[in-house]
Image (tube, coloured by chain):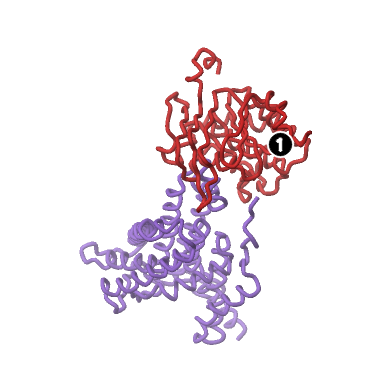
């Protein structure tokens, strides 16, 4: 009896962390753009949706026949496709919709972001069709090994491995490369960053590429784990990832990772021990609690330091 | 800088500002301000709060839009109109700007701040040498290189701000209120550094409210009053000028 309880718990933890690392990947995109532009990029969730469809079309293409060559190679192809599609879309949105409004009041650009999000949702329904599509199965979900009597499946391992690699890569890039330091400098004080000769427009474009790429990775991982994709798939998932970013502290990269994993775990526990009905209510409940009691989030700084 | 002596007065001009006009909303902050800086000089802009000193520096660095002309002699010796280039290119021409309020990046480490100072450069070995020079001249920055710059004291932050600007290897350094909010002893140190930096061949355009200190180290100075130059002269002559003494030096 006891053992089956602990097995169940471990299973929930694995599911939760795996779901959470996908939230984290998307949350990072929200938080990075916020850090640089103080903009909540509501179109981010649609960038993620488009990534899933780009991967879907390539993955289910008969001539490429990726589903017949299941494995890491096919996964990498889909990741590259989704990353490319998301980066291009992300940069284009910034260029066409946000850049002209850079000097306008913040509210204008926020409303524009919501507009772009809706535009993409409904264009998606026209272009891709509103019926759900089945994401190509490029990784077979088989049981790989057992932890404490719990079978660990290849999809969860894939998600954790890919998520970890991508987040470690991002951490290295932001902390230890010149362009990463420049991103943080622009985020800290844009005017002074200009005085250093930093091309702020280029840094902003780069930030959008980076955030969108992470959304691309997330879209493929989600497609594998929850294979039904549709043009509105970004809406709920995106808002939850946004909640994860706020939970961790918007603007903070470690915060987005922590917030994502925590949200995934909480959701999974609610589904496992209470009822799956409350799954979505939980995320918004967390948002309300955070905004009431710790608006800066778990790892966010209480106020931006200005000297 | 030794070469500049041979050149004619016209040729040694490193920065020439003509009829600078800047408006914020409906308010005209600069009303046709003109001055010039010659290579190797320390030149001060002094004046009261709100006279337009900081705005002048911001216009030169293209942080605010302006009318008028700003000509700068780049490191390669060509005279370039700064309004006609991309803002981020300016520092590559040899013009660095240490802004008002120091403007260090508080969440970046001391070292990262200095690395950002050299952002426009690609000569890795020379950058390493300049970094070493900075650490030798101000060892406190080496001790704290891994620390967040926001944890430094005000004086240390000012040193960091100056060194960060120097990491761009400028021929002209714009310094905006380096003495602001610092204890007299630290202010004296900062002015020593300014003199040293100038001796090493960096031309300096200094904006100061501490007129006495500024005039003492300056070759020449301009007095800015409500967006215009009202007086100019050598640092020494202005120190003795009764109008300056009455208005800016607090004397009688």
> What colour denotes chain A?
purple
Question: On screen, B143 above or below B130?
Answer: below
Chain B appears in which tint? red
Q: Horizontal and vertical percent for residue B59?
A: 51, 41
- Give the residue drawn at x 65%, y 50%: A307
Quarter of the figure that contains the N terminus of chain A: bottom right
Vertical placement of A25 versus B207: above or below? below
Q: Is residue A90 visible?
A: yes
Q: Residue at x 66, y 41 (%)?
A: B48
Left or right: A2 in relation to A132: right
Residue A91 lies in quadrant: bottom left
Q: Residue at x 64, y 60 (%)?
A: A303
Residue B247 lies in quadrant: top right
Of residue A102 and residue A167, the one placed in the foreground of this image is A102
> In this figure, which residue is indicated by the disc labeled 1?
B248
- The spot of residue B1 in percent (x, y) is 55, 18
Label count reads: 1
**Residue B5 occupies quadrant:** top right
Residue sitting at the far top = B6
Q: Secondary structure at mark 1?
A: helix
């Amino acid at each position: 009896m006891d053992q089956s309880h602990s097995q169940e718990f471990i299973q929930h933890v694995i599911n939760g962390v795996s779901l959470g690392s996908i939230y984290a990947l998307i949350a990072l995109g929200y938080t990075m753009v916020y850090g640089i532009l103080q903009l909540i990029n509501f179109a981010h969730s649609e960038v993620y949706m488009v990534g899933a469809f780009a991967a879907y079309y390539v993955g289910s293409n008969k001539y490429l026949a990726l589903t017949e060559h299941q494995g890491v190679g096919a996964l990498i192809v889909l990741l590259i496709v989704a990353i490319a599609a998301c980066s291009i879309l992300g940069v284009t949105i910034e260029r066409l919709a946000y850049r002209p409004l850079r000097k306008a009041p913040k509210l204008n650009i926020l409303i524009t972001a919501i507009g772009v999000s809706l535009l993409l949702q409904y264009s998606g329904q026209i272009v891709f069709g509103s019926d759900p599509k089945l994401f190509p199965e490029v990784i077979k979900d088989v049981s790989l090994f057992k932890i404490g009597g719990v079978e660990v499946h290849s999809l969860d391992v894939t998600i954790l491995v890919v998520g970890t690699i991508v987040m470690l890569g991002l951490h290295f890039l932001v902390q230890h490369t010149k362009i990463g330091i420049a991103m943080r400098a622009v985020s800290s004080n844009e005017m002074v960053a200009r005085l250093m000769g930093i091309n702020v427009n280029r840094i902003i474009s780069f930030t959008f590429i980076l955030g969108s790429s992470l959304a691309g990775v997330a879209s493929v991982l989600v497609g594998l784990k929850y294979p039904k994709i549709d043009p509105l798939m970004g809406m709920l998932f995106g808002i939850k990832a946004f909640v994860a970013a706020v939970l961790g502290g918007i603007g903070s990269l470690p915060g987005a990772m922590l917030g994502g994993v925590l949200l995934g775990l909480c959701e999974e526990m609610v589904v496992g021990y209470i009822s799956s009905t409350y799954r979505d209510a939980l995320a918004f409940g967390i948002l309300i609690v955070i905004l009431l009691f710790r608006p800066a989030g778990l790892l966010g700084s209480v106020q931006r330091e200005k000297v | 800088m030794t070469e500049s002596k041979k050149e004619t007065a016209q040729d040694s001009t490193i920065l020439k500002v003509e009829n600078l006009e800047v408006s914020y909303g409906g308010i005209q902050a600069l009303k046709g301000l003109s001055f010039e800086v010659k290579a190797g000089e320390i030149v001060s802009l002094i004046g009261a709060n709100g006279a337009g000193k900081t705005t002048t520096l911001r216009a030169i660095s293209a942080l605010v839009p302006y009318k008028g002309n700003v000509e700068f002699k780049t490191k390669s010796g060509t005279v370039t109109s700064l309004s006609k280039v991309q803002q981020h290119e300016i520092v590559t021409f040899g013009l660095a700007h240490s802004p008002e309020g120091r403007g260090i990046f508080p969440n970046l480490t001391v070292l990262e701040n200095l690395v950002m100072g050299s952002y426009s450069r690609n000569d890795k070995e020379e950058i390493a040498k300049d970094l070493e020079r900075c650490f030798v001249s101000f060892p406190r920055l080496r001790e704290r290189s891994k620390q967040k710059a926001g944890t430094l004291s005000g004086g240390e932050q000012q040193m960091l701000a100056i060194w960060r600007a120097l990491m761009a290897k400028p021929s002209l350094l714009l310094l905006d209120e380096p003495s602001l909010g610092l204890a007299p002893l630290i202010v004296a140190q900062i002015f020593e550094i300014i003199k040293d930096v100038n001796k090493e061949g960096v031309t300096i355009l200094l904006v100061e409210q501490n007129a006495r200190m500024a005039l003492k180290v300056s070759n020449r100075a301009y007095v800015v009053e409500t967006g215009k130059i009202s007086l100019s002269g050598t640092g020494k002559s202005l120190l003795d000028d009764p109008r300056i003494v009455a208005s800016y030096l607090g004397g009688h």
